[in-house]
Amino acid sequence: MIRRSLEAVESVVVVIGDHWEPERLADASDDVRIEVEAALNAGKFILPVFVGGGQIPEAASLPESIRQFANRNGIPLRPGRDFRLDYHRSMGRISAVLTPTSQ
């Protein structure tokens, strides 16, 4: 189901909060691992979004099959007055990646 759903999208947003547990990803049946793995294998644009102080995990803490996820640049999504700015920045980044450039 997850892999089929990914076929219909061009980008994937991975929300990482301060309680995100990279050690959970050692389990090959973990939903987050399956989604990230499928997105990486399909060559999808992946945008990590950090909420509540979350941050990208260290590559060494991730299973080999998703280790390259640690090389992604993410965007913080802060509450309060910065929310709109962060939201528009993240949407602009996705749009820039997905919008073909004229040559």
Image (cartoon, rainbow, N blue to C red):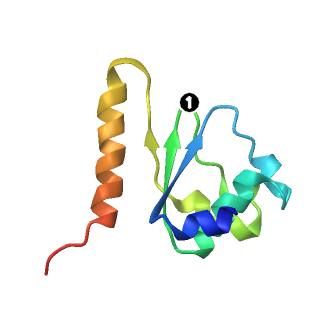
Three-letter amino acid code at the position of disc 1: Gly
Q: Residue at x 29, y 32 (%)?
A: 85
Find residue 12 and report its horizontal and vertical position in percent. 51, 57
Provide the residue designation for mark 1. 53
Which quadrant would residue 95 be assigned to in this image?
bottom left
Quarter of the image with the C terminus is: bottom left
On the picture, is 89 further left or further right than 36? Answer: left
Find residue 14 and report its horizontal and vertical position in percent. 56, 49
Q: Residue furthest top?
A: 80
Q: Residue at x 37, y 27 (%)?
A: 83
- Above-or-below relation of 95 to 65: above
Q: Residue at x 65, y 68 (%)?
A: 3
Find residue 69 and report its horizontal and vertical position in percent. 60, 61
Q: Residue furthest bottom?
A: 103
Find residue 98 and report its horizontal and vertical position in percent. 33, 65
Mark 1 neighbour class, 10 Å CA radius: few under 14, some 14 to 19, many 20 or more: few
Q: Residue furthest left?
A: 103
SS of the residue at dot 1?
Answer: loop
Which quadrant would residue 96 be assigned to in this image?
bottom left
Question: Could you say which is closer to the camera, residue 95 or residue 67?
Answer: 95
